[in-house]
Amino acid sequence: MRTHTGYLWFTTTHRQELIDITDQVAAQVADSGVTDGMVLVSAMHITASVFVNDHESGLWHDILAWLEGTVAPWAPDRYRHNETGEDNAAAHLRSLTVGHEVIVPITKGALDLGPWQRVFYGEWDGQRRKRVIVKVMGI
């Protein structure tokens, strides 16, 4: 079995951003030489997420509105975690809800995604350098 480890680095300009990383993940798969296997894509920070969904601006707006309105509003006084001097409890809850990693199958040397599926990095507490690990495994 072959393995390959790569890292993607991000410094977002906003506190929250959604970034399509599909092409960067596909490049790591190509570099690995793996033709049949899987790739693990995982945020290495507790206030970020990796997920698979549709690349459509209306949906991105809906995701951010859902996180703000339903899951974890950005209201620092609402959370006990923020009593420690932090103000990012909502980011932790958003990461917990959306998830921090995905596994994508590799078939014939390419990501085997559905017709509308893309891989995304979700930043919930950005504006500083963060990374994602891309671990490719297979034959």
Image (tube, helix red, strand yellow):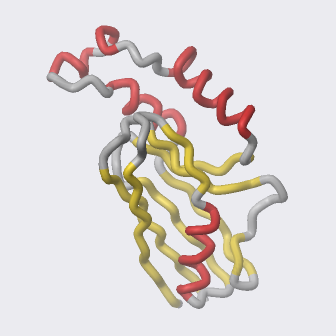
**How far from the left and from the top, in percent, is residue 74?**
41, 18
Q: Please name the residue shown 72% across and 47% down the image.
A: 55
Q: Is residue 53 above or below residue 92?
A: below
Q: Nearer the viewer, residue 128 or 25?
A: 128
- Does residue 96 show up? no
**How far from the left and from the top, in percent, is residue 106?**
68, 75
Q: Is residue 124 above or below residue 87?
A: below
In which image quadrant can residue 126 be found? Answer: top left
Q: Nearer the viewer, residue 99 or 125?
A: 125
- Does residue 106 show up? yes
**How far from the left and from the top, in percent, is residue 113?**
75, 63
Q: How many marks?
A: 0
In which image quadrant can residue 35 be found? Answer: bottom right
**How far from the left and from the top, in percent, is residue 123?**
45, 42
Q: Please name the residue shown 46% across and 58% down the image.
A: 42
Q: Please name the residue shown 47% across and 48% down the image.
A: 100
Q: Is residue 71 above or below residue 54?
A: above
Q: Nearer the viewer, residue 2 or 19?
A: 19
Task: Classify the position of the C terminus by image quarter.
Answer: bottom right
The residue lying furthest to the top in this view is 77
The residue lying furthest to the right in this view is 115
In the visual, does 31 lie left or right of 129?
Answer: right
Q: Please name the residue shown 65% across and 51% down the image.
A: 52
The residue lying furthest to the front in this view is 13
In the visual, does 54 lie left or right of 132?
Answer: right
